[in-house]
Amino acid sequence: IMPNKQVTEPTRFHGNHLLESETYVGGHVEALESGVFRSDFKYHFRVVPECMQQLIDKVDRTLRYTLKEEHGVPLDTVTNYEEVRDEVVRQLAALRDDPYRLETPLI
């Protein structure tokens, strides 16, 4: 006679809620380990300044492509192109100039 090596775990509850695991490490640690960010925690981000500069250098090409190819909008019908372009460049430059950030993710 051989003993049954598969033993079913007893069902565990906490305050009428079924526990999936008793080794829960907390939402913050779990989010960090899975690569998912929560909008209620601050995280340290390190931005690569060179990458931000590459994005800045390609802003016009990217915006034109997006307007024309993805949205089908002729560039000559856009009345605030320069304003939007300048705002995008400003935000990318802020990321480039301050690469070590402690922020809550905008999800």
Image (cartoon, grey):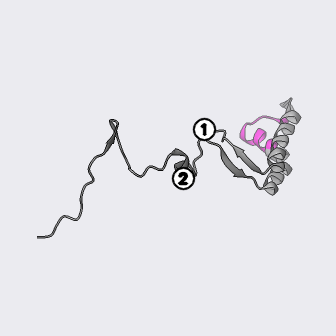
Question: Where is 18 relative to 35, above or below?
Answer: above
Q: Hey, which quadrant is residue 17 in on the image?
A: top left
Q: Indicate left or right for 53 with 36 as reference.
A: right
The picture places residue 58, in percent across and down from the top left corner, at 83, 50
The percent coordinates of residue 69 (x first, y second) are 74, 42
Circle 2 Cα neighbour tier, 10 Å, few/some/many (<14 / 14–19 / ≥20): few
Q: Position of residue 75 (x, y in %)?
A: 84, 36
Q: Which residue is mark 2?
A: 34
> What residue range appears in magenta?
63-75
| Residue 15 image position (x, y, % from top left) | 34, 36
Q: Earlier in the sequence, mark 1 or mark 2?
A: 2
Viewer-side residue, 86 vs 64: 86
The amino acid at mark 2 is Ser
In the visual, does 57 lie left or right of 28?
right
Amino acid type indicated by mark 1: Asp
Element at label 1 = loop
Quarter of the figure with residue 72: top right
Which residue appears farthest toward the bottom when viewing the image?
1
Q: What residue is disc 1 on?
A: 40
Residue at 78% x, 51% y: name it.
99
Locate the C terminus by quadrant: top right
- Measure the C-alpha gap from mark 1 to mark 2: 16 Å
For this view, does 13 lie left or right of residue 3? right
